[in-house]
Amino acid sequence: MTELSIIIVNWNSTAYLLQCLESIYAQPHAASDEIIVVDNASPDGDVGIVKERYPNVVLIESSANLGFAGANNLGFRSSRGEYVVFLNPDTVLINPAFDLMLQQVKALPSVGAVGCSLLNEDHSVQTSAIQTFPTILNQLLDIDVLRNRYPAFYLWNIAPLFAGGTKPSRVEVISGACVLFKREVFAQIGLFSEEYFMYAEDLDLCCKAAKAGFVNYYIPQAQIIHYGGRSSTVRRRAVLMKWKSILQYVAKHRGAGYQLAFRAAMACSALVRMMLLIVLVAVSRGARRESARGALLKWWLIFGTMVGHFERSQHAKSFSTQGA
């Protein structure tokens, strides 16, 4: 059994994937790692170049888009590593992140999910690297000004991202862009839940780990650039799919009654934010106006999701059949 298996799910992201693989192989011990790429029936059809450039990579070409969870589980079942890391293709290692994570994991008690520092292209911190489990209150107060002013507040607790040092921090949720598990732990908690096509799988996975008595950790010195989706089409699709998945998560782990209250609270929040943004669009100019318009669209999509508009829309249904 190899020590580490790296599992990467690809959908139409071959250019990013090649950068990702190059950064992995640039690290000292990469040759001993098992790297598995699962292509989720990408329509661009060019993933074969991976085998040409990196013949040691195990390439699994799925005939259907299994979603993020299903494809990762497929990769896991084909892996042999004592530890597994699930990695997005739109990432680049900027230090030996996996070695640093493994060093810490082996010394920590009751380890569940393990995450690292996710950075933007300009090396600024991505605050989505760690999260708290979604509740009505923390979603209502999820405002950048508050989060940045009070990073240690218990509703979001992103303080570990800015603490510096090398000490691991206990956290609730690790981003699915890069998450490491001991093989036996991942198997014990039932792998990724495949009822999620995309988004909220990381919430669900970390919740299952916590309920099973494991502790999720953030390792600050392990650093990875995470590019994320870029086009407006992807962003619109992402907003819809993300919030539908969050509603699914809330219903699963907190019950239908809580989900109903969550919908109502978020719909009201979205209405208030949209009214403020309409005013901001009217009085702003240039880049600030464009930013406000983008935020207005996002909250309109969230409002529609909360009140069930997009569930009744044939157009929105098409999103559930596509990858991201």
Image (cartoon, rainbow, N blue to C red):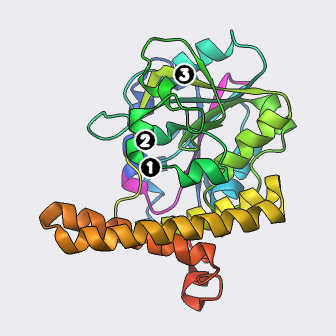
Q: How many marks on residues?
A: 3
In the picture of the structure, the residue carrying the numbered disc 1 is 143
> Residue 62: where, in percent of width, then height?
65, 62
Task: Please give the name of the residue rendered at 52% of the width and 64% of the height, measured from the top-left corner.
Answer: 269
Q: Is residue 232 left or right of residue 308?
A: left
Asked whether residue 131 is in view, the answer is yes
Residue where numbered disc 2 is placed: 146
Q: Please, which residue is most extreme toward the left here?
A: 286
What amino acid type should be assigned to the residue bearing mark 3?
A: Ile
Quick one: label 3, few (<14), some, or many (20+) residues within 10 Å? many
Residue 234 against residue 215 in the figure, above or below: below
Where residue 301 sits: x, y (%)? 49, 74
Left or right, residue 81 beside residue 257: left
**Residue 184, located in which quarter of the rendered image?**
top right
Q: Is residue 114 left or right of residue 165?
A: right
Q: Which residues are magenta?
A: 1-15
